[in-house]
Image: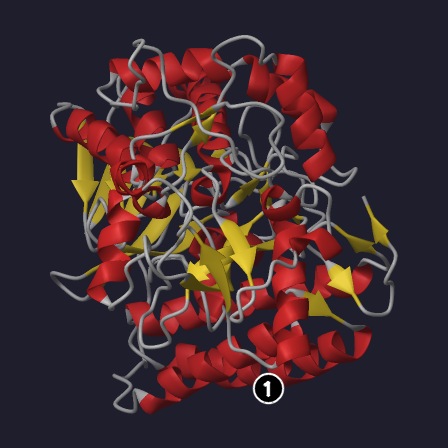
Amino acid sequence: MRKHVDFLIIGSGIAGLSYALKVAETGTVCIVTKAKAEESSTNYAQGGIAAVMYKPDSYEKHVHDTMIAGAGLCDENIVRITISESTKRIKELISWGTDFDKNKSGKYDLAKEGGHSEYRVLHSKDHTGAEIEKALLTQAIKHKNIEILENHFAVDIITQHHHGVEVNKRTNDITCYGAYVLNPNTNQIDTLLSKITLIASGGIGNMYSNTTNPEVATGDGIAMVYRAKGKTEHLEFVQFHPTALFNPKERPSFLITEALRGFGGILKTIKGVEFMQKYDARLSLAPRDIVARAIDSEMKISGDEHVCLDCRHLNKNDLILHFPTIYAKCLSIGIDITKEMIPVVPAAHYICGGIKIDEHGRSSIQNLYATGECACTGLHGANRLASNSLLESIVFSHRAALDSKSKVRSVEHHQAIPDWNSEGTVLNEEMILITQTTKELREIMSNYVGIVRSNLRLKRAMDRLEILYRETEDLYDKSILTVKICELRNMINVAYLIIKMATQRKESRGLHFSLDYPDLIK
């Protein structure tokens, strides 16, 4: 099947949906999402979205906190753009139906998280992302210009490479014409031609053994742009959330939001001993990279599989009122957080790098935009400040929408694009080839490219990844495509970029900590 639209969007989280609602005023929109539309990282975000709402907070304070967390690698211009536009974008989310919690006085009930100097995190109990996702998806579903293709998988973006033109990383006019998409209803690869394409495909967490990300987070958008010779940046900075619920039988790991520490929860060893005072004056509210490394260190010292978050001293009614989802989840596995400590462990949570974009969301490939976690704006630098990610998504999707609408009328559909050629491929009847390689990849990334790294670990990771790459490419070339083999291929591509960029960084900074360069640059 061939389909023509004005705007093609890959991903249905806050980045993709907010962009869709704005460009739909100008033309036809098709959103391709690999699972159900609501199954996005946005939907799993518990803590909230950071924005300056009331005094004594100020844009300058938020800028300062973001720059400090980013360990000297934030783009200050991008930081100022994001934060100065934050209040307007929050009001827009509210106008679309997002219901943030308010206090008794009628003001928004702002929380404080690690690295923030003021209370500025808007939330909806402990399921903020789900509240935002619901509001945006409701608006998108009823918009006459927006079509959502659920359970459709974007295999590759289409460029001139697909009609015989040679391109490489130095080609300065690579152009995106749409995407090849796996249709589950026919098991065929459809050709979706678009004037403008946005990649908003989310993160990469599932290449690690332990992650808070949903199963759909396999780095697809980043991998597609890499294969199309687009520019990527800062992928070595993988943020591990310090406090995922320790429950080895469950994947993805259930997130214990940082807001719970902001509410007064204290990190302790299994024996009930506080330890954060050994690592940072901000104690349990230090930035995530510091807390994650501290927990990793304590686990290595003790040999324990986890540490604990102690909330037993907090008011029981207030605790349950503010964190009903966490209370219910822990209770479901036999833990009453009002009486027992919560077992927690770091888990892969967010990637600060991605597809390199400018202040308008434009990638290095013409007519291709990227926003959300798959993109690298320069906001986060070497470490994301808590609750800045949802804000970044909505700010840059807004800016990308403005730029896209100004451009779309001057772009024509490319008609010389061939349909997908699957000639000579056969159905892979040995799923073990994919599942075993996925398991090996996760072990390589977790053991060698995790919270703490070294030159030797990175070299071993790259050597082993090379074998997995060759085997998977051979299988991909011979097989009728499935989502699982495409996801594995994408994760291997992104793993290569993470290891390569980590190897090139001869220092410890932010989320990249190397035993060979122990003096952390802050």
| Residue 450 appears in the figure | no
Q: Residue at position x 55%, y 78% from top?
A: 304
Q: Which residue is mark 1?
A: 467
- Using the rendered view, name the quadrant where residue 477 is placed: bottom left
Task: Look at label 1 and name its amino acid.
Answer: Ile
356 vs 140: above or below: below
The image position of residue 59, as x and y in percent, is 61, 14
The image position of residue 411, as x and y in percent, is 42, 25
The image position of residue 87, as x and y in percent, is 46, 13
SS under mark 1: helix
Q: Residue at position x 64%, y 64% from top?
A: 451
Residue 480 or residue 41, whichever sits in front: 41
Residue 245 or residue 520, whichever sits in front: 245
Residue 285 or residue 349, whichever sits in front: 285
The reply, left or right, for residue 482 in relation to residue 299 is: left
265 vs 322: above or below: below
